[in-house]
Amino acid sequence: MIKNIPFLVSLLSILVLGANYVQSSRNTTEEPPSFEEIFTEEGYKTVNAALDDFEQHFNQQLKLLFRVPPISFTHQFGRFNNLDGEINDTFEMNFISDQFPGNHFKIDVRPLKHKMDFSDKLIPKTFKLNSGTIALYEDKLVRGFNLLIFEKDGWQYVFSINKKVADEVTPEILVQIANSIDY
């Protein structure tokens, strides 16, 4: 269960960033920092730059998706979390909107040898991907987010979608997005 902590901390840091942005913009007459400045200060960069860092660290290629959820995003950021050792090293990609706070889609990827263990008791649904892999869908583990968890090519992928858009981004759509990695 300790392997879940970096994922949850990462997810919470995104929420805190947004809350700090709102709070700081209320307390000052200065121009608030842009989304880009806020995320850059937290170690985010372009997706390609973060992906390069991750692939070089693990000396292995990571396939990314061709589809994204059918909601609007204004920004995408990437981050390679290189912590002590390799057990909690992850690639993180965020799609967010500065116009619609509920439009938030996040991808976390880690090596299978350090995958997060999700208890079968928490997983309400399973889906079969085109590759034959089973994807686990969880809507109670992380407050405010639904998760799709699956394994591919030696990696564990965790998709997180804000519950505010769950009617638009269903589990079936997340499966379609996961299947787009094969192209």
Image: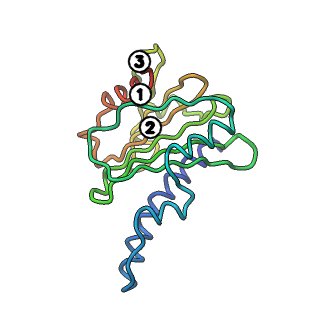
Q: Image quadrant for the C terminus?
A: top left
Q: Position of residue 100 (x, y in %)?
A: 27, 56
Pointer 3 or 2: first along the chain: 3
Residue at figure coordinates x 45%, y 28% from the top left: 136
Question: How far apart are the two marked residues, 3 and 2, measured between alpha carbons?
Answer: 15 Å
Looking at the rendered structure, the kind of residue marked 1 is: Ala
Could you classify mark 3 by the number of other residues whose Cα lies within 10 Å: few (under 14), some (14-19), or many (20 or more)? few
Question: How far apart are the two marked residues, 1 and 2, measured between alpha carbons?
Answer: 9 Å
**Could you tell me if the residues under marks 1 and 3 are in contact, i.e. CB atoms within 8 Å?**
no
Residue 178: give its label.
1
Q: Nearer the viewer, mark 1 or mark 3?
A: 1
| Residue on which disc 3 sits | 128
Pointer 1 or 2: first along the chain: 2
Of the pair 34 and 179, the residue shown nearer to us: 34
Q: Position of residue 168 (x, y in %)?
A: 24, 39
User: Under tag 2, what secondary structure?
Assistant: strand
